[in-house]
Image: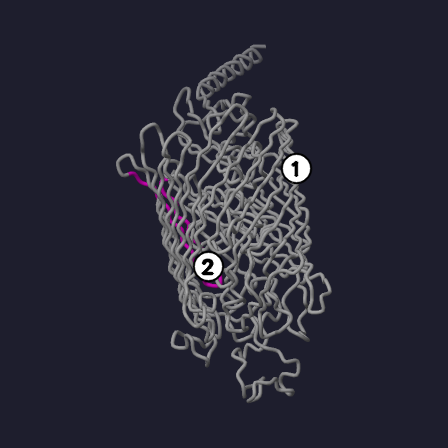
């Protein structure tokens, strides 16, 4: 009995001691609040690193973790619709309070602020114009050395290479060619015409805050070129950017890319500077056609943006960018001594580019926008020399104000373009005449909120082109939101574009074909209607966003190169009938339990012309490089315990029509193919990330992009042509000529990549 009592006393003593220990440990408490832009984030998960379970914030975004061990710990914060955040915290004895933890929105949510649709800041859900917005979160899932390649992850947007040798290209939206896409930087028409691919290939990815995409004509606000849509690249604000961000990456084939951005202050003036350097100078020929597979490039760019402090918090920004690039593709034996010669074929392009972007708030709701860019291109395409320079100056007074239920926007834009080259584009009667286009205009737009659920938008623009005269571009939109999670938009409008082939179509520059302009080219014009539906469904463990559109565009005039009639020529002419671009597109975004996410999209389209042949008969001509079906996907899974995330991304393309030669042995349509990528990212702290993976996991390689690459000059008396320039029946019975235009995918097998990022918040 005594032994039993003694055992009970010992047990009670141990229990009391243990309880006292627990009370002492429980005294170490960590509390805090999770917010976004000052608003609480409810039901966010907070997990200490190394633990399997954590806590969830309440409706006020507040959390509390008991029994925290003193010392440094790392916390993982995640929530549906927000980016995953890792934060290092120092725990002391007693009660610990963590100041507001800011979670950033994820790659594509309805709460993102957009400006491209109406030239003013508004939430994506409230915008009467459908705007797709993408943040660097998406593009980091498949890192690339430039924005041109990054856009391949966007559904309905196709970065199209137009040349197998020099790899220049443009951006197609819903199957329409690159010249119909306007590219903006911070809302300014910086990247266009002569410099689409070069302008996009020098912006440090780490400087990009978000990319906004409007599909369909936007000429009412942005003028010429915004026919198929626009892409607005918005750079980071020097006031809110990270102090320092460094990103180095390399691939197994010898591509090296570096992005460095840093912010600093000079007095009260904040500034951010970004430097990008890309180097790939490795002559590879995996398809054994004697030509480089991927263009060799050395590119350097520097971007500097200033935010000036002013009274009454009025805005004033100024940004400068310089790009220098040396690009080459061609025969493996080529070096600089063969530049422009007819012995060894090469395409050598030297580019120098300067840009200036400014914005100044003159008074309440009154802004002055300005931009200027200079582009100098010194190129040889075989023996064809192309030397061109372009100046584009843009200025605009913009005023917006609210009157009751009306949101008015008006502007006085002015654009001046000077273009000169050594081609027939600027030659008249044997004398050089540089093109000078003066384009003043005026636009007005009224956004009327009929009720909390229904909004209308009506806009009209008038431009006067010194060559083509007056041009009117109206648009009308309706938005109906029965509740906060559902929106239907119906938009219609007009787009126009003034054509200059030699600044926009690379095929017109190559030495492989002669250019024939059948008659004076008129401005291209189109009418478009777009029906869009957006829905968001959110619960504690899952978030689903659906964004679908049906689009229809009717061209009353369109300029398209005819590659088929004569294999030695590209024939440009005004459309004698009409052209159609129509289709359906669906974007989806799924987030499950804060760890598993899927972004996927699909586009079905039919793009064609109804034109008249030489007999006057109307025939249907399918659009080249416009796949009837395409899709994108990004599947991500994160493991917060190990600071690890896995990203599986890809793009699928259905068959697309290609330019073929008469009696061409190559098919006139590309095969169905998929470019698949896999990446793993390890986060070591808030500052360090290491990532790596494989691109083109399925090892896809297009077949036979070049014909007669062993005689690219089609020499008379050579291997394939007799001394009179006629095809030799023994070696060239089908009369093939060297051609660079048969292209539908990069000539590159699977490759590995690795990179490291270092960030100081």
* Near-viewer residue (42 or 705): 705
Query: In the drawing, what numbered circle is on residue 582?
Result: none
Residue highlighted by disc 2: 194
In the image, residue 249 lies in the stretch drawn in magenta: yes
* Residue 85 visible in the shown view: yes
Residue 610 location, quadrant: bottom right
Residue 322 location, quadrant: bottom left
Residue at 52% over, 51% down: 225
* Near-viewer residue (400 or 548): 400
How many badges with numbers are in the image?
Answer: 2
Residue highlighted by disc 1: 533
Magenta range is 243-265
Residue 218, position as x, y percentages in the image:
55, 44
In the image, residue 84 lies in the stretch drawn in magenta: no
The Cα–Cα distance between marks 1 and 2, rounded to whole angstroms, is 36 Å
Mark closer to the observer (1, 2): 2
User: What crowding class fits label 1: few (fewer than 14 Cα within 10 Å), some (14-19), or many (20 or more)?
Assistant: some
* Near-viewer residue (579 or 161): 579
- Looking at the rendered structure, the secondary structure element under dot 1 is strand
Which quadrant, please, contains the C terminus? Answer: top left
Residue 80, position as x, y percentages in the image:
57, 33
């Amino acid at each position: 009995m005594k032994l039993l009592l003694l055992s009970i006393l010992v047990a009670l003593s141990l229990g009391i001691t243990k309880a006292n220990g627990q009370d002492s440990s429980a005294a170490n408490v960590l509390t805090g609040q999770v917010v976004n832009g000052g608003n609480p984030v409810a039901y966010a998960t907070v997990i200490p690193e190394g633990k399997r379970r954590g806590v969830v914030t309440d409706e006020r975004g507040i959390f509390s973790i008991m029994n925290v061990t003193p010392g440094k710990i790392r916390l993982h914060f995640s929530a549906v619709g927000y980016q995953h955040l890792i934060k290092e915290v120092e725990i002391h004895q007693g009660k610990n309070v963590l100041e507001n933890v800011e979670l950033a929105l994820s790659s594509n949510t309805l709460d993102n602020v957009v400006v491209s649709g109406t030239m003013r800041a508004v939430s994506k859900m409230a915008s009467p114009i459908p705007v797709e917005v993408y943040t660097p979160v998406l593009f980091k899932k498949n890192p690339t050395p430039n924005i041109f390649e990054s856009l391949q992850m966007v559904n309905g947007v196709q970065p199209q290479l137009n040349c197998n040798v020099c790899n220049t290209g443009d951006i197609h939206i819903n199957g329409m060619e690159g010249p119909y896409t306007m590219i903006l930087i911070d809302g300014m028409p910086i990247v266009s015409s002569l410099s689409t691919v070069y302008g996009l290939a020098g912006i440090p990815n780490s400087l990009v805050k978000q990319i906004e995409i409007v599909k369909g004509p936007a000429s009412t606000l942005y003028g010429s070129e915004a026919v198929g849509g626009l892409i607005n690249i918005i750079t980071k604000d020097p006031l809110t950017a990270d102090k320092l961000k460094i990103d180095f990456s390399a691939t197994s084939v010898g591509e090296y890319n570096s992005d460095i951005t840093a912010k600093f202050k000079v007095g009260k003036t904040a500034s951010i500077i970004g430097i990008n350097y890309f180097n790939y100078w490795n002559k590879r020929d995996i398809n054994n056609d004697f030509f480089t597979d991927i263009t060799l490039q050395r590119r350097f760019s520097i971007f500097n943006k200033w935010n000036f402090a002013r009274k009454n918090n009025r805005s004033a920004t100024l940004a400068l960018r310089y790009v220098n690039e040396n690009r080459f593709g061609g025969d493996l034996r080529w070096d600089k001594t063969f530049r422009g010669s007819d012995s060894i074929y090469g395409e050598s392009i030297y580019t120098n580019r300067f840009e200036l972007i400014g914005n100044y708030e003159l008074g309440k709701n009154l802004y002055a926008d300005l931009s200027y860019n200079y582009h100098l291109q010194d190129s040889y395409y075989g023996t064809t020399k192309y030397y061109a320079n372009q100046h584009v100056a843009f200025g605009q007074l913009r005023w917006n104000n609210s009157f009751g239920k009306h949101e008015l926007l008006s502007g006085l834009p002015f654009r001046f373009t000077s273009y000169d080259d050594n081609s027939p584009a600027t030659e008249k009667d044997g004398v050089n005449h540089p093109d000078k286009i003066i384009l003043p205009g005026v636009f007005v737009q009224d956004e009327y909120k009929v009720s909390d659920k229904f909004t209308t938008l009506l806009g009209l623009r008038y431009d006067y082109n010194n060559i083509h005269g007056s041009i009117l571009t109206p648009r009308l939109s309706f938005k109906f939101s029965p509740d906060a999670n559902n929106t239907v938009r119906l938009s219609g409008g007009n787009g126009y574009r003034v054509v200059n082939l030699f600044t926009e179509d690379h095929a017109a520059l190559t030495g492989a074909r002669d250019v024939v302009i059948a008659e004076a080219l008129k401005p291209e014009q189109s009418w478009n209607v777009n029906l869009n539906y957006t829905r968001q469904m959110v619960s504690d463990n899952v978030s689903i966003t659906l964004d679908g559109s049906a689009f229809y565009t009717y061209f009353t005039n369109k300029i398209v190169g005819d590659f088929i009639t004569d294999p030695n020529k590209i024939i440009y002419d005004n459309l004698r009938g009409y052209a159609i671009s129509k289709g359906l597109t669906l974007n989806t975004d799924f987030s499950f339990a804060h760890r598993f996410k899927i972004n996927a999209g699909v586009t079905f389209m039919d793009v064609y012309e109804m034109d008249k042949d030489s007999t006057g008969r109307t025939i249907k001509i399918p659009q080249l490089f416009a796949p009837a079906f395409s899709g994108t996907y990004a599947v991500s899974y994160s493991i917060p315990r190990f600071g690890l995330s896995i990203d599986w991304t890809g793009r699928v393309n259905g068959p697309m029509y290609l330019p073929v030669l008469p009696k061409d042995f190559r098919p006139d349509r590309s095969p169905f193919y998929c470019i698949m990528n896999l990446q793993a990212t390890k986060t070591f702290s808030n500052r360090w990330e290491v990532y790596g993976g494989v691109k083109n996991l399925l090892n896809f390689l297009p077949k036979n992009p070049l014909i007669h690459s062993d005689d690219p000059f089609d020499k008379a008396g050579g291997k394939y042509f007799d001394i009179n320039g006629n095809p030799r029946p023994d070696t060239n019975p089908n009369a093939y000529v060297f051609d660079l235009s048969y292209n539908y995918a990069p000539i590159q097998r699977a490759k590995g990549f690795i990179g490291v990022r270092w960030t100081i918040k």
